[in-house]
Structures are given as C-alpha cells and as structure tokens.
Amino acid sequence: MNVFEHPSVKRVAEVLGAAGLADRLIALAETARTAEDAARAVGAPLGAIVKSLVFSIDRRMVMALVAGDHRCLPENLPAALFMKGEARQANASEVKAVTGFTIGGVAPVGALHALPMVMDRSLKRFPDLYAAAGHPHCVFRVTVDELKRLTGAIVSYNIAAPIAGKAADSGFAPSAPAHWPLGADGRRLPPRPRTPEPAAGSGGPRKKRRAVLPAGKRKRP
C-alpha cells in the first residue's frame, strides 16, 4: 500500500489540505519511529524533529510537542496547561485509543479526539520542523507558526530540557537559571547589572554624608 493511502496518513493529509499545506507530506524510505531516525531520514538537525508525546493529567489526555534534542518535563505540564494533577506518560493502548495513531507515527494533527496541547519553545530555533504524519514512514514539514496555528498549542519554555550530549549547540543550556530573561532567539540571557541612578540635580551618584555628633559626644582623638 502507498503510505499516502494509509488511513492515519489520510487523516493528517486532510488537516494539512484544509490549512493550505497539502504539499508538505514526505514519504520516507527508512523508518522514522524515533527522533533520531527521522532526523537521519530527512537530513535535518535532531532538534528540528517534533516529538508528539501523550500524557494523562488527572485522567485527561494531553499532548506535548517537544524538540527531538530535548526531553519532556512531565512535572511542568499541568501548570503549562493550566490544569491540576500529576502527569504520567500514556501507554501504547491509551495513545492508540485517543489519537488513532501507533507510537512511532503519532502526529500532532489528525487525532481521533481533540487534545489540549503545549509546545516546547525551543522548537523556534529552526525555520523548518518535521513531525510524524500518522505512519513511521511518513512525516510532514511545517514551521513553528504553522504548527501553532494547526494545533492551537500553548507555547512554553519550561516543559522540556536539553538532552545531555544532544543539544550542546542549541543555546538552551540546562545550567541557565530559570529566572534569567529570554532573548529574542529563545536563549536565556544573564540580567544586566544595575547601576546606581544619579541623584536629581546632580551630575553623579549622591555621596554619603558623614554624621556630625554633638560636641559632648565627639570621640576624643
């Protein structure tokens, strides 16, 4: 069977076609069951591969879209999705039941049931992304903005962290403190040092005045 004729791929194709992205499907000669497989198959950086991960939060299924060179942080998913409860990764049968996809070909669009979604902000590093299209031998190309529009995902910077040895050049260093501000490219930047403001009506910082003690309390030399 032509991979484009597979029922799961056709569901994805319908969503892409309705969004004006009908030409984005790519059939692969090699399997793309893992992010590493997909990166090799399309010749893209590992971080440009979108991992569509299904979790359960208080018995409600959700999906996290994570860069291939990052690992998901399940403990941060509830807050990112404005939900309460603990997150656990769904098993294969749960994923199949809620999305209609088999693990290794889970697409971020075309699922049987609509899921709350959150997207890893580090995906913004790449102009083009590649996501599974419902089958291990099929992916589709998409930009971050297009993926956000297709899925309605919330974009979050704290649902994922770099995988040691796989995201060394990503600019998302795990050692960067969480309170550091994000730059335009999504990298965490050290805050600028604060300089004292000059006093009003003066040309520089105000000098401290020496306290003058009463004559009877002055220290003897």
Image (cartoon, rainbow, N blue to C red):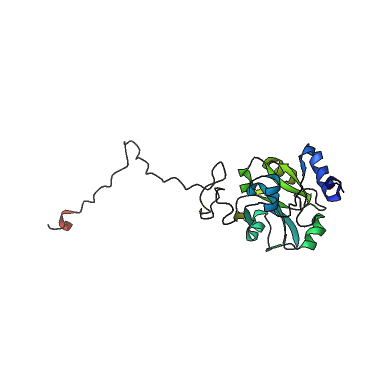
At which x and y percent is residue 70? 62, 54
Q: Quadrant of residue 186?
A: top right
Front in this rendered view, residue 64 or 81: 64
Seen at 55% across and 51% down, the residue is 168
Can residue 183 be seen?
A: yes
Seen at 21% across and 51% down, the residue is 212
Front in this rendered view, residue 123 or 29: 29
Left-right relation of 149 to 214:
right
At which x and y percent is residue 201? 33, 35
Q: Quadrant of residue 88?
A: bottom right
Residue sitting farthest toward the left:
221
Q: How many marks?
A: 0
Can residue 159 be seen?
A: no
Front in this rendered view, residue 145 or 34: 34
Left-right relation of 30 to 11:
left
Quick check: 24 above or below 133?
Answer: above
Residue sitting farthest toward the front:
29
At which x and y percent is residue 117? 71, 51
At which x and y percent is residue 141? 72, 42
Front in this rendered view, residue 207 or 120: 120
Image quadrant occupied by the C terminus? bottom left
Left-right relation of 188 to 156:
left
